Image (cartoon, helix red, strand yellow):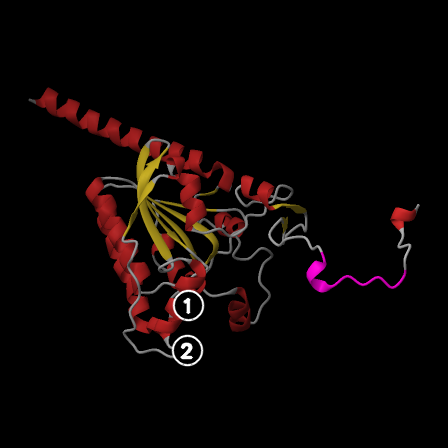
Amino acid sequence: MPWFKRVEKGIHTPTEEKKETPDGLWYKCPSCKAVTSMAEHRKNLSTCVKCNHHDRVGSKEYFAILFDNNEFTELDANLTSGDPLDFVDSKPYPNRIVATQKSTGLKDAVRSAYGKMNGQEITISCMDFNFIGGSMGSVVGEKIARAIDHARKTRTPFMMISKSGGARMMEAGFSLMQMAKTSAKLALLSEEGLPYISMLTDPTTGGVTASYAMLGDFNIAEPGALIGFAGPRVIKETIGKDLPKGFQSAEFVLEHGFLDFIVDRKELKQKLTDLLTMVYVKEADATATKSSKATKAS
């Protein structure tokens, strides 16, 4: 049949007239290689419809998932990094910051916001891996510290969503100081009896894991997330032995007692709501019991 073969020979179509499939229409899962439309992938909250592989997403997506109607008030939105060390590698640090801000539309590697989740008020800080590998610099530490202060002031639960390669080398000691700073703020949150939920996503490593990411009243993670301090290659070279299968995956970390549970992204909002409802019910019961005893004593 003529429409299945080229009748005329020597036909050449100019490059500018060739019809190609537009970029961004299809998604290929890096785990099972299944192909689906980007629209379907986004509808499934960036998880594979076949194998449930959780793709990396940022604060924009997590805020849309967690906050009711995607309505929230962002905290300290315009806080940006300085250059305390006059650091230069392949380019000056300020130039790298400006270039990354332009390419990502972000001010730094974390965003903090306040809003309602299924009617429950909550303060959330979420890291973005696209901003210099989600590295923890002075702005990241400061914004998290301020978000914790906001949670204390408004008497709301605090949630931290971590996704980071660790400390930001361009700020050296200033970056490492954020580990102690954020940990001290979390201690104050704990003293006031406010719940802290730490969610570890792919990847959570380095100084972030060694500080606020593992200090939650509840430490949770997404399926398959890489969680650790040093990378598997570094550990293997250091100890000179092969590592166990699945080493540093969320499932491995859960099995060895460092996580409370793993939650699918599609169930995250309801699971968090149920968890916080349970915590507050217990707190309310304790308050009521204490009040009743005081009344009887008087």
Circle 1 is placed at which residue position?
A: 99
Residue 228 image position (x, y, % from top left): 46, 59
Q: Residue furthest top?
A: 296
Q: Are marks 2 and 1 in contact (CB under 8 Å)?
A: yes
Instruction: Determine which quarter of the picture holds residue 270.
Output: top left
On the picture, is 74 further left or further right than 17?
A: left
61 vs 158, nearest the viewer: 61
Residue sitting at 17 percent across and 28 percent down? 290
Q: Earlier in the sequence, mark 2 or mark 1?
A: 2
Question: In the rendered structure, which amino acid carries the disc numbered 2?
Answer: Lys
Q: Secondary structure at mark 2?
A: loop
Residue sitting at 40 percent across and 35 percent down? 69
Which quadrant holds the C terminus? top left
Q: Which residues are magenta?
A: 9-18
**Whether residue 208 can be seen here:** yes
Query: What whole-number distance in Å separates the C-alpha atoms at marks 2 and 1?
Result: 11 Å
Which quadrant holds the N terminus? top right
Residue sitting at 58 percent across and 47 percent down? 53
Vertical order, 291 against 202 (above or below): above
Residue 178 image position (x, y, % from top left): 29, 63
On the picture, is 293 further left or further right than 228?
A: left
Q: Which mark is residue 91?
A: 2
On the picture, is 22 further left or further right than 257?
A: right
Q: Secondary structure at mark 1?
A: helix
